[in-house]
Image (cartoon, rainbow, N blue to C red):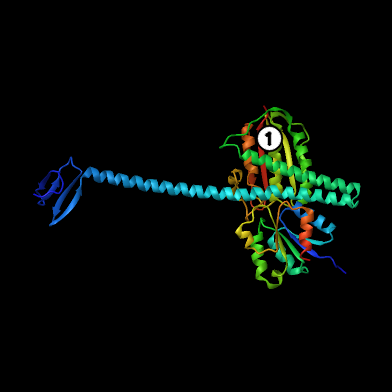
Amino acid sequence: MICLCSYSVVRCPSVGLLEVLEHHDHAVVRRRGTWTIVESASVKATKEELSRINEELERRVQERTEELRAALAIREQFLSAASHELKTPLMATQLYIDSLVEATEARRLSEEERRQRLERASASYRRLGQLIENLFDVSRPGSALPSVEREQVDLATLAREVVERFAAPARLAGCELAIRADRPVIGRWDPMRLDQILTNLLANALTHARGTPIEVVVEEHGDRAVSTVRDSGAGIASEDQARVFEKFAQVGAGPARGGFGLGLWIVRQNATAMGGTVAVESAPGRGATFRVELPRS
Amino acid sequence: METRATILVIDDDDEIRQVLAMVLDEAGFRVVTAANGREALERLRGDPRPDVILLDLMMPEMDGYQFRAEQQRHPALRAIPTLIVIAGTVTPRVEALGAEAILPKPVSLRRLVDTIRRFC
């Protein structure tokens, strides 16, 4: 009997070959005149297990790579959208101010024209501020909800202020903006968060429902405050309705609809942080109604 | 007799269109506007050709890249000097658009007017 290693082997009686002893991992055997290395069952099993693990690892690496690639693409899109969004009001502000400086040097503008131009510069500046506010919100780690500083607030008064602020942008977008908030709706909320909710809902309506009427309604329903922003724009397909509240959601045709795709996500974050909910009712061609419900205490 | 040079402003932002129309009018230009590339192409078919195009890149429906591709397909439109107003960095893709000038946002009124005057 010839054996190239020190393993002990026995003759396999059935086929007349050498059989590997169980407690050894390998043996060298002669089959039909050729020497080969034979693995024991346990080595085979271990190798198979290893190859399974490798395949699994490979699959996971591929999955992670895809995820990272997608995250990078989102990051790039986001950065370029953020840059575009922030620089647009910045450029408008700069041009208003430059034109004021030139007109003042040339003593061209009337008092009223100067006032109007300053107001526009101020509105652009405020728009920039809102965008920056939204950006800060998204940079909060993970899915952490925003902090809420509660005080007694009249939501009706606050809503009227927000709507007033949107008078000029609404005119530019060709939207007739109306509000129904006749009675005070008092509750304990964070006024900054409430403002952001209404601001983002109105900004969203102006972007997606240009040239159509927009109505804001604030009402009290028992122990809850209900605010709705209704537009008559293109509406949202039912399969997209859940997605509009997701981070970076950009629903609708075309590459850029304006905004970061963060506005409605922030609305939901704020509503949730104050114990409330937000929902959308819409159908294609029939506009959209966003409804925010908040407990009053 | 209209002697003022005409600028076509293509930008999806209402406010930008409005402020550009205002300041360029005061600087002595005639201004027409379009809210996206498709609208701009329609205008270019009908109205007299502008002397300069001021083009934003990120727009819905038809963005600046697509507009530029369409523009370059038509010999008559290709000749119109086109200035790109850009918010982000000037990538190779932007350079490949072959615009006469690239103006980074926010652009000052003086630089904007000086650049436009170089082409009309």
Does any portion of residue A145 appear in the rendered image? yes
Task: Please report the residue visible at 50 percent of the width from the left and 47 percent of the height from the top.
Answer: A68
Image quadrant in which you'd find residue B46: bottom right
Total tally of numbered discs in the picture: 1
Quadrant including the C terminus of chain A: top right
Q: Is residue A207 left or right of residue A107?
A: left
Mark 1 lies on residue: A193
Would residue A175 be visible to someone looking at this image?
Answer: no
| 10 Å crowding of disc 1: few (<14), some (14-19), many (20+) | many
Q: In this view, does B51 lie above or below A217?
A: below
Looking at the picture, how far across and down is residue A192, in whole percent? 70, 34
Q: Identify the residue shown where x is 73% and y is 33%.
A: A155
Q: Where is residue A229 in the image (x, y as percent from the top left)?
A: 70, 42
Locate residue A263, reporting x and y percent. 65, 43
Question: At 81% from the left edge and 48% from the top edge, which residue is drawn?
Answer: A97
Q: Is mark 1 on a helix, strand or loop?
A: helix
Task: Please name the amino acid that badge 1 sits on.
Answer: Arg
Residue A230 in the image, given as x and y percentages of width and height: 70, 44
Of residues B70 and A216, the one nearer the viewer is B70
Most foreground residue, B81 or A201: B81
Name of the residue lying farthest toward the bottom: B75
Pinpoint the chain carrying mark 1. Answer: A
Residue A126 picture quarter: top right
Task: Name the image quarter holding residue B4.
Answer: bottom right
Image height of A103 relative to A275, above or below: below
